[in-house]
Amino acid sequence: MTSKTFPLSRRLRRLGAAIALSLPLGALAAADETAPAPSTLPTQELTAGVLYNFLLAEIAGARGQIGLSTQLYLELAQHTHDPRIARRATEIALFSRNLAAASRAAKLWAESDPGSEEARRVLAGVVSSSEGRVEDVQIQLARVLAQSPDALPQNLMGLNRALSRMENKETVRSMVLRLTEPYLDHPEAHFARAQASIVAEDPMSALAAIDTALQLRPDWEPAVIFKAQLMQQAGAERDASALLASQLARHPESNNLRLAHARLLVSLRDFENARAEFNKLLEAAPNDPELLFAVGLLSFQLEDNDNAASLFERALAANHPDPDAIRLHLGQIAERRKDTEGALKWYRAIPEPSRQYGDAQIRIAIALANGGRLAEARAHLQNQPGDAEVKRRYLLAEAQLLRDAGQPQQAFDLLEAALLKAPDDTDLLYESAMLAERLDRVDAMETRLRKLIALEPEHAHAYNALGYSLADRGLRLEEAEQLIARAVELAPQDPFILDSLGWVRFRRGDNSGAIAVLEQAYGLRSDPEIAAHLGEVLWSLNRQADANRVFDEALAAHPDNTVLRDTVQRLRKP
């Protein structure tokens, strides 16, 4: 009987994946979906009772009574020891998320069809998912590995997936180490050990294991990519990039390596070289909407507006799954071109149910304000429907419009009124503190940032903002450095926080300590204000040529930045 309530037996593997039980041992291991050979099936008489209970179980499932269907099928499997019925009982128990029943049914299936690799895989996954005894899980997995030599590489690669539902990751790692012990001449065994180690938060062991895998199989693509990921997580992003680049030089046909390298270059903010890699991928698949979008985004970051717009429009024509994200970027390109009406056209094409709708409304307001229509922009945000959280977001955007329009007092007053209703709102506290700093109301800024830190002790930017503001005014410099150092602990790769640390060291007379941190910050992000600080410290060290190189590079990219321009004029004046 075909039921619309739960799937048929042939869909067991898809069902297991859909309910995220991670049942197949290996992601690459093909499921054995063939029924047992007739000679292996028990001699089963189709009595009236068996037929009645079989039909009753199917009808119950068809009517949505999954619990009853599970119970009836389990009883049938126990009575008949027929692997086909046990398999069906396992399927329905999984569908109902009854892991105890699924475990019993899967054991009956494996017992009644001991030659079925699929039965053993499913049993191992169910036992793991139902948090059975570690010994039981290990025994089942060891049997799968030992009794399936042809599928050993795939099954080794799938060990961690089979155990992914177990909460104690150290237990998982110990089990993986024991299970792989007989197979250490296979690189997949060391790959499995590396996976288990990284989940157990032991990156050094993971790296050692993946290196062993590569010794056994040099140039093994999955291991090379995994090693690069481990290096990236350890902060050695440039070394990871060099590893992938050297591997690509030997295997330029590998799209997987190229994609991994392109993504790593994006994380390094090396957008030009990342775009070159994505373009090579695009040459092989010129109508791939995801690749079109990726190259469009990189062109957008590089402010190559014409190329970005062309790629985005091609991605739209290729039916990219997130067309509204593309429309949002096309609107921003129109804004860059000072085409307010073109920008509004793209933003207004984003419908209200879209995830991008809120961003689109804020961009509409920004486009209006940049076009000299500030009152209209504010009214647009104020008139938008939405719940309290949506309204709060539009309020913060309105304050930013006022700030950008040179009206910080009006922006401060707007947030002040909102804080009366929500005095512990951390976003309102932070934004109002930044406005207080701009208005030179240091006491108000400090009071709000300290309250924010009390409410959210790991708010890195609150520590940074307070420390930088004190440092920039030459106030309580030792305390300022302590605050910024705490921010660095919370966000060690944030270029703006590193910039603050360099600046407070400069203010304290530690020029050599300042230059190292500022160069790191500028390497992470070529921001004009970081450039201003780096250039000033270089200048103070009598490295005017280096300072001028930084200034000229930043001025070419950001000619209108006030902080940068004022710093250059002050230092270069005769």
Image (cartoon, rainbow, N blue to C red):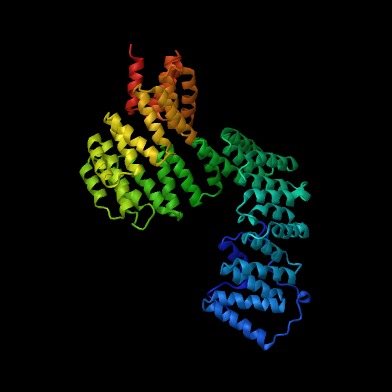
- Can you give x and y, in whole percent of width and height, for residue 535 in the image? 42, 21
State which quadrant residue 103 falls in: bottom right
- Can you give x and y, in whole percent of width and height, for residue 449 in the image? 35, 35
Residue lying farthest front? Answer: 454
State which quadrant residue 414 falls in: top left
Q: Which residue is drawn at the image coordinates 28% and 55% (left, top)?
A: 385
Residue 20 position (above or below residue 253): below
Depth check: give the residue in front, 252 or 115. 115
Mark yes or no: residue 65 visible.
yes
State which quadrant residue 532 falls in: top left
Depth check: give the residue in front, 389 or 370. 389
On the rendered structure, is 527 left or right of 6? Answer: left
- Can you give x and y, in whole percent of width and height, for residue 504 in the image? 42, 23
The number of discs equals: 0
Residue 214 position (above or below residue 164): above
Position of the C terminus, as image quadrant, is top left
Residue 37 position (above or below residue 523): below
- Can you give x and y, in whole percent of width and height, for residue 107 in the image? 70, 68
